[in-house]
Amino acid sequence: DAHAGRGHAAVRPRRDLPVPRVVRRRRPDPRHHHVRVRHDV
């Protein structure tokens, strides 16, 4: 039971995490782009 409960619980919070994480990752995206452009030059 403990294993089955952990698997189900891990799948639920993992789907909710990627939603807010994508929004936070989009903000640093522009900063990474600047670094990539400098590397290209």
Image: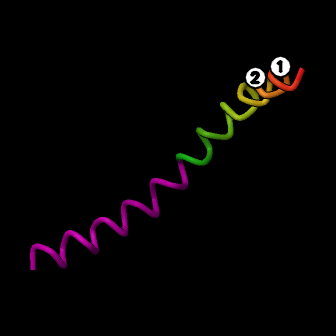
Extent of the magenta region: 1-20
Return the residue at label 2: 35
Q: Could you say which is closer to the camera, residue 7 or residue 38?
A: 38
Q: Residues within 10 Å of mark 2 (few under 14, many from 20)?
A: few
- Amino acid on which the number 2 mark rests in the picture: Val
Q: Residues within 10 Å of mark 1 (few under 14, many from 20)?
A: few
Q: Disc 1, disc 2: CB below 8 Å?
A: yes
Find numbered disc 2 in the image and state the secondary structure of the residue it sits on.
Answer: helix
Residue 26 placement, left or right of 12:
right
Q: Could you say which is closer to the camera, residue 35 or residue 9?
A: 35
Residue 20 percent across, percent down from the top left: 53, 48
Return the residue at label 1: 38
Q: Please give the name of the residue rendered at 10% of the width and 73% of the height, measured from the top-left corner.
A: 2
Residue 19 picture quarter = bottom right
Residue 7 percent across, percent down from the top left: 26, 72
Q: Please give the name of the residue rendered at 20% of the width and 69% of the height, measured from the top-left corner.
A: 6
Residue 40 percent across, percent down from the top left: 86, 26
- Amino acid on which the number 1 mark rests in the picture: Arg
The stretch drawn in magenta includes residue 13: yes
Find numbered disc 1 in the image and state the secondary structure of the residue it sits on.
Answer: helix
